[in-house]
Amino acid sequence: MWNVEGRLQGQTMDVPLTETGFIEAAHAAAELVDRPLTALWSSDQLRALQTAGVVVARHDLTVRATPLLREQSLGDLEGRLASEMTEQPVPDGMDISEVRWGGGESIADVHERMRALVAALREEFGDDDEVALVSHGDALRVLLAVLEGKGHRDVDWSGFGTGSVHTVSLGADTDDVLARTIAAVQPASAVALAEAEQRQAQLTKPPGSLGALEVLANRLSAMAGRCPAPIPEPAVIGLFAGDHGVCAQGVSPWPQEVTASMVMNIAGGGAAINALARQVGASLLVTDVGVATDHPAHPAIRNRVVARGTHDFTVEPAMTRDEARAALAVGIEAAEEAIAGGARCLLTGEMGIGNTTPASALIAVFTRTRPALVTGRGAGADDQMLSVKTQVIERGLKLHQPQTDDPLGTLAAIGGLEHAALAGFILAGAAHRVPVVLDGVIACSAACVAAAFAPAVRDYLVSGHAGAEPGIRTALAHLGLQPLVDLGMRLGEGSGAAVALPMVQAAARIMAEMATFAEAGIEAGS
């Protein structure tokens, strides 16, 4: 009805189909009648639900309504005549796809929503499933851009007539997954950052009195593209586990079998990261991406094993390029699953005996620093073992000659499966404009890899802590980050990120809930 009247519909929920709309829905149903549909998902707006009802009548299915398939929200412009609209300037520093007209959604927001939809579909359905999606023109155009690996600025606005049927493939090819994730990483908003800095100056406190929390709050606004930023909650800790062939060189005092034992301990809720997660209200998403030792299946462990550990990088590449790419895709999938489930902050976690050795090697390469300066004691190496560890890294770098402009090759040569998964996890968080809180040296090495793939990743990173490993501060300097705390921690698992999470959330809450001088009726400077 509003289409006929020339009114902007957006997410107005109760606009029904016209008689022509029902005819078009019948034509769409006829095109789909012989397709072996597994499921039918629809926008929860009335006109889409009515279309879905016509289609589903020809199949033994029920309609699943989801807000993920809604049209772009146009805020207070909805219901107004398009003929009444006047052209508005795009704010400096922004693309038109990033403007929230009428206080509704930007195309960038819809793009993020469609990415969450794709992640949810991939989680629920297999390669052989056919799923019908009933949505709206602009939402479907953005969805197609997501499936083609395009960013929010590159949406094709042609096609998708009302009632038309289009067949697309979700595709799970890891090349496509990595490429479209990298393409979706955009710089944080300079406009929102400026707005946040201006608001900080108006809050009822002396300028700069909250120190690093003010800087962080401003950065969170830039990440979100709005001021004030939403509180980064709920939070999910993505913990990835893997083993390392380089342990054969005597770089850790712990046997490799401890990795599997600790993964089971984490799955059972008995590790330090479990206690910390409970304390700060974060949930754990545990993924076995490459544990070498068999362990019992557990409902709290996602089995995404790419390989049973890496090879010894002093002898041969730790992984093939395909294995590294697949592990990156595992991390991307985990982040997208978390975000689709509502996560608004991602924390990095890991478990893997010997994993500080590849971490130090990666940091040495990407920061162009001598291994001796970025190699630490890990889980308790003595002086002799530390010397061996440094020499092992030097041998690996001499053998493979890894290059900073080939992050995939470098990761494959000297990295670890959990390092790769963490890099993918970080990339996907940044692609969704979700803050990613880094833990220790493993996470920092993965962040260096992610930043080599997509430099704008840096804009979405928060350093949880400095830690005892020397490579952390070198990596953070390379990434342009300052740690929130320094408690001398060296456990890993995501523990430092979890400890820092309340500070990250507090920074956003201060910006959102603290009164300005004008709101409090206080004259600034009095």
Image: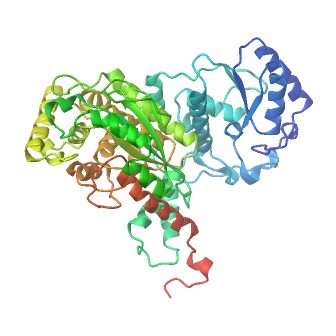
Which residue, as the protein is rendered here, is positioned at the far right?
Answer: 19
Q: What is the number of callouts on the image?
A: 0
Horizontal relation, residue 487 to residue 225: left or right: left
From the top left corner, tell me how far across and down residue 379 is, in percent: 22, 46
- Nearest the viewer among 13 and 380 is 380
Q: Residue at x 82, y 38 (%)?
A: 46
Q: Nearer the viewer, residue 4 or 260?
A: 260
Estimate the x, y position of residue 479 in percent, counting from the top left.
32, 49
Look at the image and tell me whether residue 525 can be seen.
yes
Q: In the displayed structure, does residue 432 sit left or right of residue 26?
A: left
* Above or below, comparing residue 231 to residue 125 in the picture: below
Residue, far top: 34
For the point 84% across and 37% down, which residue is it?
Answer: 3
Percent x, y of residue 179: 44, 29
Image height of 385 relative to 62, above or below: below
Task: Name the quadrant containing residue 360.
Answer: top left
Residue at the image position 76 percent from the left and 11 percent from the top: 34
Quarter in which the N terminus is drawn: top right
Camera-nearest residue between 25 and 278: 278
Image coordinates for residue 47, horizontal then vertical, percent: 82, 35
For residue 202, above or below residue 127? below
Q: Is residue 453 visible?
A: no
Residue at the far bottom in the pictured view:
526
